[in-house]
């Protein structure tokens, strides 16, 4: 097969989904389970599942979920890119580039201002205009060193059955999403299939989900979903592990109450929590914060497809105006010069012919979009060119007091 053979990118049919799912899972180093070969209604939509073909052979695939993503002070329609793969027999033939371009053109045609993804490799998606939107940390602490110095919360935690959790958890997720840039909506199908069905293959040797609800005066203000693994050494001492899958508190008191709860579960040696936000309160309330092991990682990456529509979907932190030249070599139709203006909390990015005060690539503007990074910081890295005074204005306008957070991989 010639290296320059044209790549045909198109949506797959339902009949093609088993081949698509098998090749996708194989490319990520696994074997697809027979029960997961079927199309999964409620989560993955066929009208967002692409495959790239060379000479009739399925050489790669890319799909997306339908989301709304929290923004600073608002939310925006977002294409949640997932399952991007190229078969090892077809690497470096333009398959990935063709699929990325076709997919982003569909995002534009659907009227979705942004696309987002979790990158399997941090050097892959920058060339397609994706910028790192937030960083998060995986944490680990031994229970013996997990004392919290903050005053105990006045509410209480109680364990829920699955049926009770199905009612109690979604409103808390949505309350957190409403204030937290980067969090995605969950459909009813997503809650059922990704959270509550809880198949054994997803537990990795641990228990099924446990659900702890934090309440004050009968009001549900937070929850933790977690698993445990009970093990003991040869002297009968507990060496077990508790893995926090999710922990959300819509108030500081709720967060304190939930962390005290998970740190207090008996017969546990180590507590782990993945994908915690940059502004997590845990390091600041521990008696010995050095005992908390934190491993930072790049989290969600963001792609701006329609800059004016994207900025209209978020708020500004303060008033100001800066003219930005945005370069985009992958999607030239997304580039341009924009006057980013903030007044009365409203934010606009209007095309303009004025002289640019700052210049950056689309991926860099995407990194600024959720308020997790400062323009001044990125300019020090050589990613933004322009007047330092205008960088300060961009920082004031685009910053946000709540760190962006995407607490689940999609």
Image: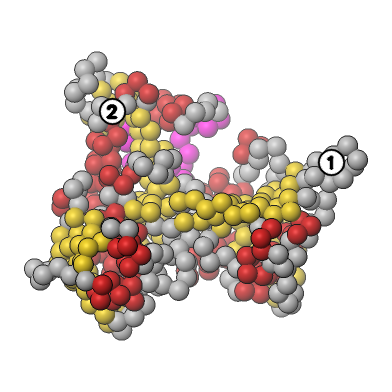
Outermost residue on the left side: it is 353
Q: Tell me where residue 148 appears, x and y as whole percent.
A: 72, 68
Residue shown at 29% from the left, 54% from the top? 363
403 relative position to 199: left or right? left
Residues at badges 1 and 2 in contact (C-beta under 8 Å)? no
Q: Residues within 10 Å of mark 2 (few under 14, many from 20)?
A: few
Helix, strand or loop status at disc 2:
loop
What x and y, as percent, mark residue 9? 25, 33
Secondary structure at badge 1 equals loop
Mark 1 Cα-neighbour bin, 10 Å: few <14, some 14–19, many ≥20: few
Instruction: Identify the colour scheme used.
Output: secondary structure
Question: Which region shows up in magenta?
Answer: 34-51
Camera-nearest residue between 113 and 376: 376
State yes or no: residue 90 in magenta: no
- 15 vs 241, left or right, is left
Q: Is residue 193 visible?
A: yes
Residue at image point 46% right, 26% down: 26
Point out residue 201 in the picture as x, y percentages from the top left corner: 63, 35
Which mark, residue 89? none
Query: Mark 1 or mark 2: which comes first in sequence?
Result: 2
User: Residue 232 shows which numbered tag?
Assistant: 1
Which of 32 and 119 lies nearest the eye of the viewer? 119
Q: Which residue is mark 2?
A: 92
Q: Residue shown at 15%/64% (left/top)?
A: 337
Which corner quadrant of the image does residue 380 belong to? bottom left
Residue 140 in percent (x, y) is at 66, 52
Marks 1/2: CA distance? 49 Å
Q: Determine whether 210 is above or below 325 in the image.
A: above
Q: Is residue 209 above or below residue 282?
A: above
């Amino acid at each position: 097969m010639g290296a320059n053979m044209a790549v045909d990118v198109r949506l797959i049919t339902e009949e093609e989904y088993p081949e698509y799912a098998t090749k996708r899972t194989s490319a990520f180093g696994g074997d697809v389970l027979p029960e997961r070969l079927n199309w999964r209604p409620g989560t993955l939509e066929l009208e967002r599942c692409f495959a790239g073909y060379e000479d009739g052979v399925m050489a790669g695939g890319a799909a997306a979920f339908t989301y709304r993503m929290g923004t600073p002070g608002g939310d925006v329609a977002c294409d949640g890119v997932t399952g991007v793969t190229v078969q090892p027999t077809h690497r470096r033939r333009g398959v990935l580039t063709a699929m990325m371009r076709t997919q982003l053109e569909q995002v534009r045609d659907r009227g979705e201002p942004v696309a987002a993804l979790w990158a399997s490799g941090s050097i892959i998606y920058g060339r397609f205009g994706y910028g790192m939107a937030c960083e998060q940390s995986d944490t680990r602490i031994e229970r013996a060193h997990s004392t919290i110095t903050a005053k105990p919360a006045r509410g209480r935690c109680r364990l829920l059955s699955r049926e009770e959790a199905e009612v109690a958890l979604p409103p808390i997720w949505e309350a957190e999403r409403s204030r937290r840039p980067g969090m995605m909506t969950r459909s009813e199908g997503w809650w059922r299939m990704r959270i509550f069905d809880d198949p054994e293959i997803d537990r990795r040797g641990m228990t099924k989900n446990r659900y702890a609800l934090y309440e004050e005066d009968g009001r549900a203000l937070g929850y933790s979903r977690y698993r445990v693994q009970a093990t003991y050494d040869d002297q009968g001492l507990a060496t077990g592990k508790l893995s926090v899958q999710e922990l959300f508190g819509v108030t500081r008191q709720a967060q304190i109450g939930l962390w005290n709860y998970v740190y207090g579960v008996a017969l546990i040696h180590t507590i782990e929590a993945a994908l915690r936000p940059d502004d997590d309160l845990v390091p600041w309330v521990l008696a010995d914060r050095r005992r908390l092991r934190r491993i930072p990682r790049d989290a969600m990456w963001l792609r701006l497809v329609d800059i004016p529509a994207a900025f209209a979907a978020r708020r500004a932190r303060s008033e100001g105006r800066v003219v930005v030249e945005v370069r985009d070599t992958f999607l030239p139709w997304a580039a341009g010069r924009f006057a980013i203006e903030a007044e009365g909390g409203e934010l606009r990015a209007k095309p303009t012919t004025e002289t640019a005060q700052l210049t950056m690539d689309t991926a860099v503007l995407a990194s600024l979009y959720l308020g997790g990074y400062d323009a001044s910081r990125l300019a020090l890295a050589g990613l933004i060119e322009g007047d330092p005074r205008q960088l300060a204005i961009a920082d004031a306008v685009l910053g946000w007091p709540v760190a962006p957070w995407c607490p689940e991989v999609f």
